[in-house]
Amino acid sequence: MAFANFPEQEQVVSLLQRSLEAGRLAHAYLFSGHDLVELEAVARTLAKTLNCQNPKKGAGGGAVDCCDKCPVCLRIDESLHPDVHPVRPESKSRVITIDQTRDLIHDLNLKPTEARYKVGIIAGVDRMNLQAANAFLKTLEEPPARSILVLLTTSPNRVLETILSRCLRLNFAGEQRLNPENLSWVASFSEAAAKETTGGLMSRYRLLGSLAAQLTRQRSEIEKRLEARSPLERHDDADPKLREKWEEELEAAVESEYRRQRTELLSALQWWVRDVWLLTFLSGSDLLALPHLVEFSKSVASRLKPSESMDNLKVLEQLQSWLGTNAQEALALEVGLLRLKL
């Protein structure tokens, strides 16, 4: 992808392009946003633009976008360029380890194989453990000549302050909207909840089953999409060690994207639960986040006290907090959903 393929991020992309054209890039960036896949794509586009054989040039003659077609661009996209170094959390622990960090530092300090700029891309820098971060600080503050570091996160509040203070931060979040698939599922969930008038244990297990089935569908779709993009699908004859590395990165990428989408799905559910809470003491729908579901929301609200609806919001906040750790997903979902009063 080229910078032109990110129209929704025009403002922040234009800042990068002005820095590119003026030759005044920062030595280290922190890209934050809602979508780690998009952030990685922007980071690769920056790496491609810095090293493209046929870049698009601005009025001042400097490169402002990549051609997205030359051999350099294609190899960067496929994670095959020797001077562009992606780092992702390891699959088992989902942390960026000190060994990964030392490997990156070593690679950055070598002379470029062929590129004008060496680029290190750290996806999920909020998963860098303290030991790795401490080992990385000197390089982050003073990278080798003609090298750029791009750190990516969907959780900037979890990035260590020592890392934040050494980076130029760019926010690619834009406006976060509830996607149609999540809205559709919340509509089905709210309708089912409205019909479950008994409020018993079996009712809540049925609602839990609906959530579990949706999460399973999401994970399956993520696996298919990311497997199709993985170099594993295009390079059957790659070195076994490289294939093992790609497999670990794919597993970690699937887990990271799944967790992001799970958070978004539960956030959509939280908006509906908030609407139910509002309707326990308000009759109108002017303040509702999901006014098209007001019929189902009112039905559930009529059975609850305001304090019970507030407890529901606290339950979902606690559930999100549990899932942000390494808590067992199935157990956390069961405990959370069974505590809801619907």
Image (tube, rainbow, N blue to C red):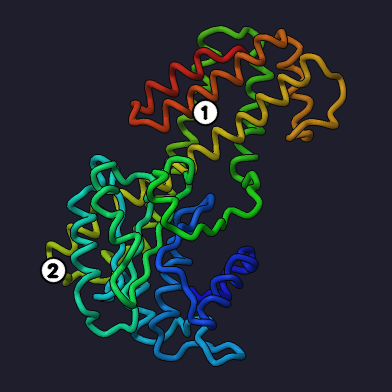
Count of residue discs:
2
Q: What amino acid is at disc 1?
A: Ser
Label 1 Cα crowd, 10 Å radius (few <14 / some 14-19 / many 20+):
some
Apparent side of residue 160 relative to residue 298 in the rendered image (left or right)? left
x and y, in percent, of residue 299 in the image: 75, 17
* Residue identifier under label 1: 210
Q: Is residue 226 left or right of residue 100?
A: right
User: Is 98 placed left or right of 123 in the picture?
Assistant: left
Check if mark 2's residue and mark 1's residue have beta carbons within 8 Å: no
Task: Name the residue at 54% across, 33% down.
Answer: 266
Look at label 2 and name its amino acid: Asp
Q: In the image, which disc is placed on residue 54?
A: none
Foreground of the two, 276 or 49: 49
- Foreground label between 2 and 1: 2
Cα distance, mark 2 to mark 1? Answer: 43 Å
Query: Is the residue 296 above or below the residue 129 in the image?
Result: above
